[in-house]
Image (cartoon, rainbow, N blue to C red):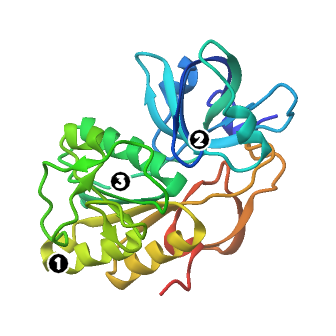
Amino acid sequence: MSHPEHRGTIFVEDAEVLSHVPWPEQQFVLTVRAPKCAARARPGTFAHLTCDTDLPMRRPLSIMRADPEAGTLEFLYKIVGHGLAQLSTRRPGDRLSVMGPIGQPFRAHPERPRTLLIGGGVGIPPMVFFAESLAREAVPWRPVVLMGSEIPFPFKTRPSTLLVDGMPEGVIACLPELDAIGVPSRLASGAGFPGCYEGFVTELGREWLENLDAAAKAEVEVFACGPTPMLKAAAALARAFDLPCQVSLEEYMACAVGGCAGCTVLVQTDEGPAMKRVCVDGPVFDARQVFPDAA
């Protein structure tokens, strides 16, 4: 049963699989038709999917795209464990249960239009959703999307046609779909992929920020999603430049609607330390509340 405050905002739908595209290193992009969830999804929210009829426990997946008009949701995931291995066998025409959208979204602030979006690994999907949403808004956002991966990216990279002041020379690989809508993106990896920054994605963020003048830095807000070590590094990066930062946490979940309290994390609030549920109180939190000692 969902938590009372979320009644009427989370839906369970019998979704049809529309496409399921494999990428290297057991990565997949799954598209389903789930119109109620698609109409209400926001960047940073996620859905809880039934992977197989023999598996009672659902799996949480971040939403990479939501198309309210088409009623579709798109997910990027990497096989980790039996559940997602079973999900990877779903084919177009199959049906699976989708519960969502769940959680608190990212929230950008117009006084800081230079949104720095940092995604690592399976933390890439919310950044894509967020960037594309900002591009559709009337506010003159100036997003820069940085994505890091130690395995091949789950899309065909190419040199960007968009210049980004302050980027290191030679760092030119991008996500073409973002480039096409005027949102600059750059990629980082230690695997030596062409056009990528050699190093951690947060290090690329640091080099970019160091090359901004004071006025430009004052317009930056940082958003990050990825593994915990990357989130801590993003929080430390934001603190070093005195920038606000929001992070989306990854956590094991059972119910995903706030009932079991199995995904709680310690958060520093104005009233003192508190245990918050990643599923419904998050997954997006203020970085300083979650990583108060990041430096």
Q: Position of residue 288 (x, y in %)?
A: 51, 75
The tag earlier along the polypeptide, 3 or 1, is 3
Circles 2 and 3: CB distance less than 8 Å? no
Give the CA distance from mark 3 to mark 1: 22 Å
Q: Element at badge 2?
A: strand
Circle 2: is it few (<14), some (14-19), or many (20+) Cα within 10 Å? many
The tag earlier along the polypeptide, 2 or 3, is 2
Circle 2 is placed at which residue position? 46
Evaluate whether residue 267 shows in this view: yes
In this rendering, is residue 24 above or below 37?
A: below
Circle 3: is it few (<14), some (14-19), or many (20+) Cα within 10 Å? some
Q: Position of residue 70 (x, y in %)?
A: 43, 16
Left or right, 132 with respect to 289, comes to: left
Q: Quadrant of the N terminus?
A: top right
Q: Which mark is residue 108?
A: 3
Circle 1 is placed at which residue position? 211
Q: Element at badge 1?
A: loop
Q: Position of residue 291 (x, y in %)?
A: 56, 77
